[in-house]
C-alpha cells in the first residue's frame, strides 16, 4: 500500500475564470510549476457544493451517489436540512474505503462528512442547531478530538466570519498533520465562494479573498513542511465550481401557487399539502412532486413555456435529467440564463427585473458553461511535474486517488487522469 500522505483541499468557487489572478500568486504559482495543472475542470449538475463533493469522493454522478442538491426536499420548512451526513452517499467513498483499508483519515469542514467513520472529523454541519453548536459539532464529528483542537486554537464559533473559520480549519489541518499524521486529509476552504456570493464573481473583494487564500495555503504548508517535506506528500488542490453573476430573481413556486399546487404561508414558504415544488439550486431549479403524475409534470412544463420568461435558458424533462446524470427523483430541471437566479419564495411575482441589481454570484448552472468551470493542481511524488492539461472532469478525481492508494473503489463513472508518473 502507498504510504505517501495525501492532502486534498477544496478551494470552493475558485474557477477557471480566476486563472489570471491565482496563477500569478506566489504559492499557487509554485504549485503549478511543480505539478500537473488542469486549467478547466467540468463539474456535475447541479453545480452545488454537496453534490460535487460527493462526486469528488465517489467518482460518480449525483444520480448514482444520491446527493442531488445541497438541501433535502422539505418544502414546508423555512430552513431545510442539508445533506450533512456521510450516510446520504450511496456506495463506496474514499473516506469509507480508506478507513476499511486501515488508513487514518482527517476531514475539516468537508461537505457530507457528518458521522463519517473516520478518526479525525470536524464536519460541516448546521450552524443553527437546537442546543449548543459545539455539542452539535462533536455529536456529528470526533468529539474528543474536537475538544483537543479547541484547547489549542480556541472554540470554533459558527458566528465567526468565513475568513476566521477558514483560518481555524487550516491551522487545525497543519496541527493534525504534525500531531496525528493522518494518511489522507480533506480540507474545505470557503471564503472565495462566500465573497463571490456577496459581491459578484469578479469584484475586487473576490481578488483579495483569492490572495488571502494563497497566503493561507502558504502558511499552512510551511507548518506542514516542518514535519515532512512537501516533495514527500501528494497534494491535490481543486475547486468544485465557479460562479456567474446574477441579479434578477425567478420564482417558479409563485407560478405553482397560481396553479393551486402549493398553498403559501405569510413568509413565502409553502404549506405541508403541496403537490409540486421547485427546489432552488441557484442558477437552476428542480421540480419535485408528491405523487408520480406525468400529466401534471407536463402541465407545469407547458405553463412555464407559455409564460415565455426572459430568464429561462432550458427546461430538461425526466429523460434529459437522467442523461445529465443529475437525479432520479426530480421531474423537471430548469436552467437560468446568465443574470438570473431562482428564488424559492412563492409570493408577489414569477420573474422580476425590478430588484436591486447586485450583481451577486451564484452557481448551480450547467457545469459546461465556461464561467462555471473549476480548476485543479496535482503536486507530489505520484504526479507529473510541470504538466498542463486543458480539460478534465471532476468525477475523475476519485479514480485517480484510487489508482494511487488501491482503495478498491467500485462502480466509478470517472477514469484515471493522465497526471500520474
Image (cartoon, helix red, strand yellow):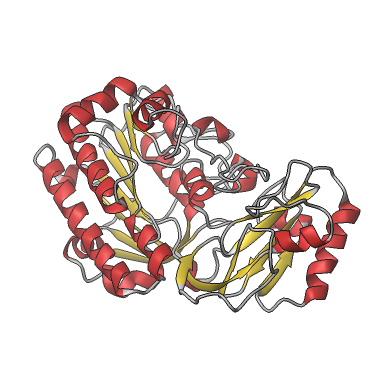
Residue 383 shows in the view: no
Instruction: Name the residue at 31% across, 37% down.
Output: 185
Residue 130 shows in the view: yes
Percent of width and height locating residue 92: 53, 33
Q: Quadrant of residue 143?
A: top left
Of residues 254 and 84, which is closer to you in this image?
Answer: 254
Q: Is residue 284 left or right of residue 53?
A: right
Percent of width and height locating residue 135: 37, 25
- Number of numbered markers: 0
As drawn, 97 above or below 263: above
As drawn, 99 above or below 359: above
Percent of width and height locating residue 18: 35, 70
Of residues 361 and 325, which is closer to you in this image?
Answer: 361
Q: Is residue 126 left or right of residue 314?
A: left
Percent of width and height locating residue 141: 38, 27
Instruction: Name the residue at 48% across, 38% down.
Output: 112
Of residues 248 and 2, which is closer to you in this image?
Answer: 248
As drawn, 57 above or below 347: above
Instruction: Name the residue at 18% across, 35% down.
Output: 153
Instruction: Name the residue at 91% across, 55% down.
Output: 295
As drawn, 94 above or below 388: above
Of residues 18 and 171, which is closer to you in this image?
Answer: 171
Amino acid at each position: 500500500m502507498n504510504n505517501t500522505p495525501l492532502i486534498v483541499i477544496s478551494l470552493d468557487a475558485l474557477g477557471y475564470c480566476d486563472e489570471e489572478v491565482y496563477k500569478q500568486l506566489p504559492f499557487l504559482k509554485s504549485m503549478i510549476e511543480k505539478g500537473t495543472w488542469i486549467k478547466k475542470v467540468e463539474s456535475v449538475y447541479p453545480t452545488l457544493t454537496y453534490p460535487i463533493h460527493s462526486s469528488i469522493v465517489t467518482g460518480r454522478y449525483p444520480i448514482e451517489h444520491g446527493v442531488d442538491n445541497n438541501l433535502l426536499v422539505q418544502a414546508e420548512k423555512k430552513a431545510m436540512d442539508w445533506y450533512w451526513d456521510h450516510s446520504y452517499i450511496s456506495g463506496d467513498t474514499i473516506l469509507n474505503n480508506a478507513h476499511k483499508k486501515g488508513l487514518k483519515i482527517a476531514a475539516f469542514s468537508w461537505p457530507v462528512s457528518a458521522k463519517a467513520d473516520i478518526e479525525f472529523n470536524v464536519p460541516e454541519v448546521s450552524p443553527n442547531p437546537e442546543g449548543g453548536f459545539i455539542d452539535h459539532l462533536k455529536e456529528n464529528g470526533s468529539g474528543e478530538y474536537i475538544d483537543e483542537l479547541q484547547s489549542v486554537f480556541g472554540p470554533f464559533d459558527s458566528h465567526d466570519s468565513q475568513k476566521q473559520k477558514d483560518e481555524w480549519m487550516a491551522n487545525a489541518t497543519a496541527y493534525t498533520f504534525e500531531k496525528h499524521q493522518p494518511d489522507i486529509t480533506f480540507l474545505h476552504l470557503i471564503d472565495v465562494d462566500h465573497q463571490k456570493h456577496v459581491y459578484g464573481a469578479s469584484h475586487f473583494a473576490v481578488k483579495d479573498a483569492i490572495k488571502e487564500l494563497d497566503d493561507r495555503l502558504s502558511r499552512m504548508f510551511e507548518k506542514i513542511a516542518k514535519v515532512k517535506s512537501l516533495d514527500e506528500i501528494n497534494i491535490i488542490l481543486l475547486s468544485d465550481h465557479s460562479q456567474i453573476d446574477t441579479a434578477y430573481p425567478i420564482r417558479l413556486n409563485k407560478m405553482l401557487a397560481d396553479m393551486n399546487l402549493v398553498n403559501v404561508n405569510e413568509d413565502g414558504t409553502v404549506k405541508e399539502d403541496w403537490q409540486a415544488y421547485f427546489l432552488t439550486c441557484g442558477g437552476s431549479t428542480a421540480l419535485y412532486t408528491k405523487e408520480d403524475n406525468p400529466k401534471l409534470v407536463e402541465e407545469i412544463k407547458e405553463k412555464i413555456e407559455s409564460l415565455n420568461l426572459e430568464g429561462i435558458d432550458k427546461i430538461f424533462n425526466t429523460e434529459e435529467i437522467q442523461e445529465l446524470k443529475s437525479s432520479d427523483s426530480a421531474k423537471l430541471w430548469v436552467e437560468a440564463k446568465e443574470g438570473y437566479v431562482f428564488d424559492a419564495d412563492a409570493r408577489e411575482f414569477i420573474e422580476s427585473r425590478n430588484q436591486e441589481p447586485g450583481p451577486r454570484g451564484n452557481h448551480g448552472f450547467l457545469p459546461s458553461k465556461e464561467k462555471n468551470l473549476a480548476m485543479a493542481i496535482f503536486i507530489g511524488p505520484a504526479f507529473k511535474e510541470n504538466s498542463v492539461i486543458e480539460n478534465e472532469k471532476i468525477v475523475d478525481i476519485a479514480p485517480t486517488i484510487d489508482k494511487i492508494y488501491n482503495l478498491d473503489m467500485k462502480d466509478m463513472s470517472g477514469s484515471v487522469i493522465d497526471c500520474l508518473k
